[in-house]
Image (spheres, grey):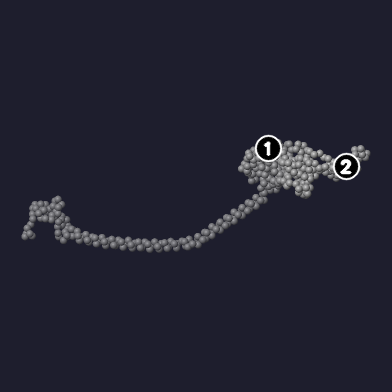
Amino acid sequence: MTTFEPAPGHAPPPDSVHPRDSSPETPTSISRLNETIRGFVSNWGSVWVEGEITAWSLRGGHVFGRLKDASGDALISFRLWSSTLQRLPDDLKLGDRVVACVKSDYFVKSGDFTFTVSAMRHTGLGDQLERLERLRAQLRSEGLFDPARKKRLPFLPHVIGLITGERSDAERDVHRNAELRWPHVRFRTIHAAVQGDRCVPETIAALRTLDADPDVDVIVIARGGGDPQTLLGFSDEKLLRAVAAASTPVVSAIGHENDHPLLDDVADLRASTPTDAAKRVVPDVAEQRAIVQQLRSRARMRLTQRIAHDIAQLDQLRSRPVLRAPEGMLVARSHELFTLTARGRDVVTRHVHDGERRVAQLQASLRALSPGATLARGYAIAHTDGGIIVRDAAQAPAGASVVVTVAEGSFAARSEGPVAESDT
């Protein structure tokens, strides 16, 4: 590193304090002491330093931040004037490793010591940020960020488990906003360190305790904002795997909107702030009542519309002639049935009479052609015992038995033989 060197042409102020110039009887003033320190500091030139940005706050167009040494054992505060900031890269952010040209400055009134940055450029990601990125890639490849494994939060949790710092603003924000939305909400709060070496083990212990409680429906891990250095505990691999293994849904509410520890990616829900966590976990009773009222109104309106529609349809059906005077249809059908019946009767009677006439004609024809008619005129039929009709007198020689059939019956006779024509 470049060492500080006095600026050319600068010497300690003539009224600077020397240890021999002060004593309990003749003490010097604080302002004179600060002026002396400022005189020495102003003689130091600019120096290039390398470090990691651990704080970056923009106020009034100026930047106030801190740089951490690679060893992690030393920090300096710096400021960047807006005019200098305009000349720097636009992507400078927390966690970046940079080299900066700084000049020391000492404030006489407040006794504060800081450095003013005149130039700054990247040298790559800081070690911590690089480790976090490697861990982020590993956890993503294992599926811990997969939305499919995220558990859904209950609509109305009976008991909310809260892990946060003792007497912290985050705890008050979560309680106040949750109770404003649902006055009967209950909490089981376990206080844990939210930064430092105790943060990870205490948070894991609290998480396991709440996860084992069957009454706890959801767990909120909440903490206020801070620089990335103080939020590192919430990107610890042990804590992240404990959250992923929990059976109870876990909500991450760490810092402010721009803070993004790895816990936000592993948790089942990421809330931008503790206040946002309370709003996401607990439903608003006024809002739910409004929704219920809206649903009731919609149901009432739909039911009214349906009833009105059905009544209109019923009136339309009842207005039809067939339903308005149903006996008319029966009368018309009865008349039609009577007409068809009478027509059918006439047709049947006509056919019967025609049949009778036809039968009489056939009977007359049969009667005229029947042998019975011939017999009725006095004729007779003679046939032998074998049933052979006698047509020739030779068929009935004398002494032959014959049967004679007349119009009214038959009788037996004996042939006396053929008779001569003269005899007849």
Q: Quadrant of residue 32?
A: top right
Of 53 and 211, nearer the camera is 53
| Residue 23 % position (x, y) | 92, 38
Q: Residue at x 63, y 43 (%)?
A: 147
- Residue 131 screen position, x and y as percent: 69, 38
One can see residue 322 in this view: yes
Vertical placement of 312 versus 51: above or below? Answer: below
Q: Is residue 137 above or below residue 404?
A: above
Q: Nearer the viewer, residue 251 or 329?
A: 251
Q: Quadrant of residue 334?
A: bottom left
Residue 54: image quadrant is: top right
Please state, as top left, top right, bottom left or bottom right, where the N terminus lies in the image: top right
Please state which of residues 357 and 246 is positioned toward the viewer in this rendering: 246
Disc number for residue 237:
1
Q: Label 1 crowding class (10 Å Cα cut-off): few <14, some 14-19, many 20+?
A: some
**Residue 417: % across, % down:** 8, 54
Name the residue carrying label 2.
11
Query: Which amino acid does the dot numbered 2 rest on?
Result: Ala
Q: Position of residue 299 (x, y in %)?
A: 59, 54
* Type of amino acid at the residue the image marks with label 1: Glu
Residue at 80% across, 44% down:
116
Which badge, 2 or 1, is on the more N-terminal residue?
A: 2
Mark yes or no: residue 403 visible. Answer: no
* Relative horizontal placement of residue 71, taking residue 293 as reference (left or right): right
